[in-house]
Image (tube, rainbow, N blue to C red):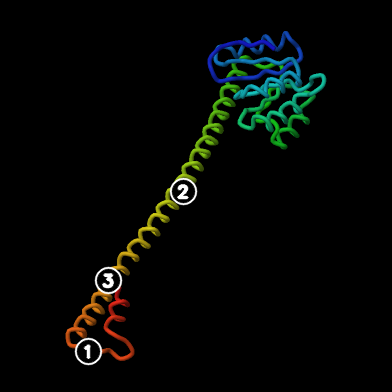
């Protein structure tokens, strides 16, 4: 695997022919940071540690062909744009892959260099947009979760405040009632009264 360092976005080229691989990589270097893989197995090893914006693969390769590689790309790096480069005789296979959602774009050999750069640029922009939407959705979910926790804390605090207010109001009312009972007991004691069923002292004790 060789790496051509340029500007972002990142691209992964998969091609078993080393000459085609190097030439295509050079075409994309001015605008991209390009990784290259000679075959499907090497491409999958790269995907385990890299997150390319675009994967461009030849269709016919020994071992894993291009469609098998892009199927794994969809599983491992779902945001990445997926493109197949192929010959005229392979169009039915490509159309089937497009219908199954394995391929975003395809291009016939031989292709014009500028056309390749334009398509890769578009796929990279789409990939970045998907990644940004995913990050925004994750941030929104995290904020919603935090908001729910905040609301729950607020409701708990409000419930505790209501309990506190109820306790304070109850204590106030009970204090008033106890004061009335105490005053009544004192009044009876001063007048020598004796309430039915009890004594003035029992009234005092009840008030306390």
Q: Which residue is mark 3?
A: 175
Q: How many marks?
A: 3
Of the numbered discs 2 and 1, the one sitting upstream in the chain is 2
Asked if the residue under mark 3 is in contact with the one under mark 2, i.e. CB atoms within 8 Å, the reply is no
Quarter of the image where one finds residue 167: bottom left
Q: Residue at x 54, y 27 (%)?
A: 125
Which type of secondary structure does the marked residue at label 2 adopt? helix
Going by the picture, which residue comes out furthest to the bottom? 196
Comparing marks 1 and 3, which lies closer to the viewer? 1
Which type of secondary structure does the marked residue at label 1 adopt? loop
Residue 198: x percent and y percent? 32, 87
Mark pair 1, 3: CA separation? 24 Å
Asked if the residue under mark 3 is in contact with the one under mark 1, i.e. CB atoms within 8 Å, the reply is no
In the figure, 146 relative to 122: above or below?
Answer: below
Residue 193: mark: 1
Camera-nearest residue between 118 and 132? 132
Of the numbered discs 2 and 3, the one sitting upstream in the chain is 2
Q: Which residue is mark 2?
A: 149
Which type of secondary structure does the marked residue at label 3 adopt? helix
Quadrant position of the C terminus in the picture: bottom left
Q: Is residue 205 left or right of residue 137?
A: left
Camera-nearest residue between 122 and 43? 43
Q: Residue at x 69, y 33 (%)?
A: 75
Asked if the residue under mark 1 is in contact with the one under mark 2, i.e. CB atoms within 8 Å, the reply is no
Residue 11: x percent and y percent? 62, 19
Q: Quick one: label 1, few (<14), some, or many (20+) residues within 10 Å?
A: few
Comparing marks 2 and 3, which lies closer to the viewer? 3
Comparing marks 2 and 1, which lies closer to the viewer? 1
């Amino acid at each position: 695997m060789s790496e051509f360092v340029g500007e972002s976005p990142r691209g992964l080229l998969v091609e078993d022919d080393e000459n085609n691989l190097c030439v295509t990589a050079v075409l994309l270097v001015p605008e991209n940071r390009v990784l290259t893989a000679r075959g499907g197995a090497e491409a999958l090893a790269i995907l385990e540690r890299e997150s390319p914006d675009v994967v461009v693969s030849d269709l016919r390769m020994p071992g894993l062909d291009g469609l098998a590689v892009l199927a794994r790309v969809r599983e491992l790096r779902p945001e990445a744009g997926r493109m197949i480069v192929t010959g005229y005789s392979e169009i039915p296979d490509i159309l089937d892959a497009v219908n199954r959602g394995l391929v975003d774009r395809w291009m016939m050999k031989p292709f014009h260099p500028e056309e390749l750069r334009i398509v890769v640029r578009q796929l990279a922009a789409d990939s970045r947009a998907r990644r940004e939407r995913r990050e925004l959705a994750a941030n929104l979910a995290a904020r919603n979760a935090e908001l729910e926790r905040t609301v729950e804390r607020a409701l708990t605090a409000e419930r505790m405040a209501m309990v506190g207010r109820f306790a304070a109001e109850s204590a106030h009312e009970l204090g008033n009632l106890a004061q009335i009972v105490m005053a009544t007991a004192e009044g009876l004691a001063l007048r020598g009264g004796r309430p039915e069923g009890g004594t003035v002292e029992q009234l005092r004790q009840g008030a306390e």
